[in-house]
Amino acid sequence: MRIFYSNQSTDRQRLLISYLSPKSARSSFGPFYNALVAEIVCPWLARVGNVNDGGKWTCNPWALPDDCIIYSLGVGPDITFELETFKVSEERCKIYSFDPDPKLGQRLVDLKSDRFVFTPLRIAAETNDALHQKTVADIMKQFSHSFIDFFKIDIEGKYILTFKNEGIPSSAF
């Protein structure tokens, strides 16, 4: 784990120096928080993916079970979380990614791996096929999943609205 953090330290330092510079044109604290090491109770806490916006804090990603199912809601232009999670899990997981912009998931499609499934749709409080949007429960039904091993959500402030009708299916975890 020490090697894992050491590999990120240069990027983390560069990001903090840039952000804290008096010349920085910062409009939010997002980049600052992304560079910090999170404080939660997890002996194997690791930031998987880019130390900037694409990475996410996870607890023991090395312990994911064989044939695990990962849902990644909101891909964005940075797919380092998906790629590094795949690597850290020793390619045991199947990663289902969702984003309304088909171009953003194209890099996952280009990997030509059956372990990456990208679906261009918006996660929403109600399913509406005409608008290319579905609830998490309907997505789980579509893929015949009764359980999600790892759930990443990064849908730009729409978290509460997205789950207002049904919440996140508790049977999924």
Image: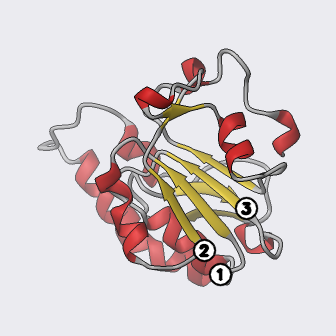
Up-down relation of residue 126 to residue 74 (above or below): above
Dot label at residue 69? 3
Identify the residue position indicated by label 2 in the image.
Answer: 115
Task: Please give left or right for residue 145 compared with residue 162 in the image.
Answer: right
Q: Are marks 1 and 3 in contact (CB under 8 Å)?
A: no
The residue that mark 1 highlights is 91
Q: Quadrant of residue 104?
A: bottom left
Label 3, label 2: how far apart the Cα atoms are: 10 Å
Q: Which residue is situated farthest in the front direction here? A: 130
Q: Which quadrant of the figure contains the N terminus?
A: bottom right
Q: Secondary structure at mark 2?
A: loop
Question: Is disc 2 surrounded by few (<14), some (14 to 19) or many (20+) residues within 10 Å?
Answer: some
Mark 1 closeness class: few <14, some 14–19, many ≥20 residues within 10 Å: some
Q: How many marks?
A: 3
x and y percentages locating residue 56 in the rendered image = 55, 54
Question: Quick check: 1 left or right of 78?
Answer: right
By what rule are the colours in the image chosen? secondary structure
Name which residue lies at 41% across and 69% down.
109
Instruction: Tell me where residue 21 appears, x and y as whole percent.
Output: 20, 48
Q: Is residue 68 left or right of residue 115?
A: right
Instruction: Pick whichever of labels 1 and 3 is earlier in the sequence.
Output: 3
Q: Is residue 88 shown to the viewer in this render?
A: yes
Q: Of tags 2 and 1, which is closer to the observer?
A: 2
* Vertical placement of residue 30 versus 104, above or below: above
Which SS class for mark 3?
strand
**Residue at image point 49% right, 25% down:** 158
User: Which three-letter amino acid code belongs to the residue tagged 3?
Assistant: Ile
- Whether the residues at callouts 2 and 1 have beta carbons within 8 Å, the answer is yes
Which residue appears at 50% of the width and 63% of the height?
Answer: 81
